[in-house]
Image (cartoon, rainbow, N blue to C red):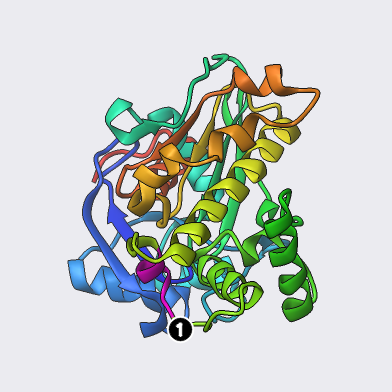
């Protein structure tokens, strides 16, 4: 359940393949239960269990989609509304972390070099409507996700231009949160700030227009700065979690700029943190290109929760 789209799929039991994959615009529904009910009505399904992964915190029995405009929700009310015997509600990047062991070579595009430590923690970072961060730890009893709100740390500005952008951000928003720049709206914000710094017109461009316009110097610089800042942020996550198993990049923006990302300063900024460059140089980074990785992770969570559930 993201800030822009709510994506759904069915499985017939633990380990089953995804089917009836569909996306519904979040804005078309007043809440999570209503969006899920609309999907189930459309596909004619009445499942006994579900896992819903939401783009926001799940705390003390409530959930809140930070960028969707939906009210805070109660999982028990959603379970009753949908007629489910079992419901898991988790953070969307918790689901994305749980998907990582299930992604194959065709689902990933390496960004730079590195060699994963197979027993070490993994991490996932993803700019989309917001900025998500999560970790995954291997234990003798299975994988344990580490959800959090790491997209709201301070933006890792390093160059003179980035510091100017960060100052404009702080003046406008009252805080220099990473999500304010490393997201779809953030990409547009970077270009707008660069135009202001250079005394140029601040055009009303969408993130897609900025990412696709390779002829406009400010749009190119905005995308390059976006990738560089993301590299610094991902390196911070790797250091914080000790993610020597790899750092994976998700979200809806990066697959559209994969060529720019691979040729950008992302990897140099990921590694460039004295005195731990050697530590970071060994950590692989990869872009997730699977079309629905959070659905894979939600299915994995259900398999953990209900390992003995018989296929429908």
Q: Is residue 264 above or below residue 120?
A: below
Q: Where, by quadrant of the figure, is residue 239 drawn? A: top right
Give the residue furthest to the front.
Answer: 199
In the foreground, 210 or 12 = 210
Q: Is residue 305 visible?
A: no
Q: Quadrant of the N terminus?
A: bottom left
Boundaries of the magenta span: 205-210
Q: Is residue 85 left or right of residue 242?
A: left
Q: Is residue 177 above or below residue 30?
A: above
Q: Is residue 37 visible?
A: yes
Q: Is residue 172 left or right of residue 300?
A: right
Residue 198 % position (x, y): 61, 73
Residue 281 % position (x, y): 62, 20
Q: Is residue 52 above or below residue 272?
A: below
* Tag 1 residue: 204
The residue positioned 66% from the left and 42% from the top of the image is 232
Magenta span contains residue 207: yes
Q: Where, by quadrant of the figure, is residue 111 drawn? A: top left
User: Label 1 neighbourhood size at 10 Å, few (<14), some (14-19), many (20+)?
Assistant: few
SS at circle 1: loop
Q: Is residue 176 above or below residue 271?
A: below
The residue positioned 69% from the left and 55% from the top of the image is 149
In the foreground, 273 or 293 = 273
In the foreground, 116 or 204 = 204
The residue positioned 35% from the left and 56% from the top of the image is 48
Magenta span contains residue 32: no
Q: What kind of secondary structure does the magenta stretch mostly adopt?
A: helix
Residue 297 % position (x, y): 43, 43
In the foreground, 155 or 49 = 155
Residue 141 % position (x, y): 58, 22
The residue positioned 36% from the left and 84% from the top of the image is 28
């Amino acid at each position: 359940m993201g800030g822009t789209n709510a994506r759904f799929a069915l499985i017939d039991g633990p380990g089953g393949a995804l089917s009836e994959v569909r996306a519904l615009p979040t804005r078309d529904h007043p809440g999570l239960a209503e969006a899920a009910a609309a999907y189930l009505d459309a596909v004619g399904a009445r499942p006994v269990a579900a896992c819903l992964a939401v783009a926001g915190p799940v705390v003390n029995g409530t959930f809140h989609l930070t960028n969707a405009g939906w009210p805070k929700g109660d999982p028990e009310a959603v379970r009753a509304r949908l007629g489910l015997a079992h419901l898991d509600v988790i953070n969307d990047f918790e689901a994305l972390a749980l998907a990582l062991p299930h992604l194959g070579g065709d689902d990933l595009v390496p960004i730079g070099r590195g060699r994963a430590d197979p027993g070490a923690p993994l991490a996932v970072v993803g700019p989309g409507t917001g900025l998500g961060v999560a970790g995954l730890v291997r234990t003798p009893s299975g994988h344990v996700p580490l959800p959090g709100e790491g997209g709201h740390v301070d933006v890792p500005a390093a160059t003179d231009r980035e510091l100017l952008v960060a100052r404009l951000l702080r003046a406008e928003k009252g805080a220099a949160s990473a999500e304010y720049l490393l997201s779809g709206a953030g990409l547009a914000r970077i270009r707008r700030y660069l135009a202001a710094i250079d005394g140029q017109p601040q055009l009303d461009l969408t993130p897609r227009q900025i990412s696709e316009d390779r002829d406009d110097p400010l749009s190119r610089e905005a995308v390059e700065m976006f990738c560089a800042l993301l590299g610094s942020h991902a390196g911070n996550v790797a250091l914080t979690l000790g993610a020597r198993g790899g750092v994976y990049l998700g979200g809806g923006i990066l697959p559209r700029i994969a060529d720019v990302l691979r040729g950008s300063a992302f990897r140099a900024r990921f590694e460039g943190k004295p005195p731990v460059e050697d530590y970071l140089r060994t950590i692989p980074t990869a872009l997730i290109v699977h079309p629905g990785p959070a659905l894979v992770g939600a299915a994995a969570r259900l398999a953990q929760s209900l390992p003995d559930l018989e296929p429908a």
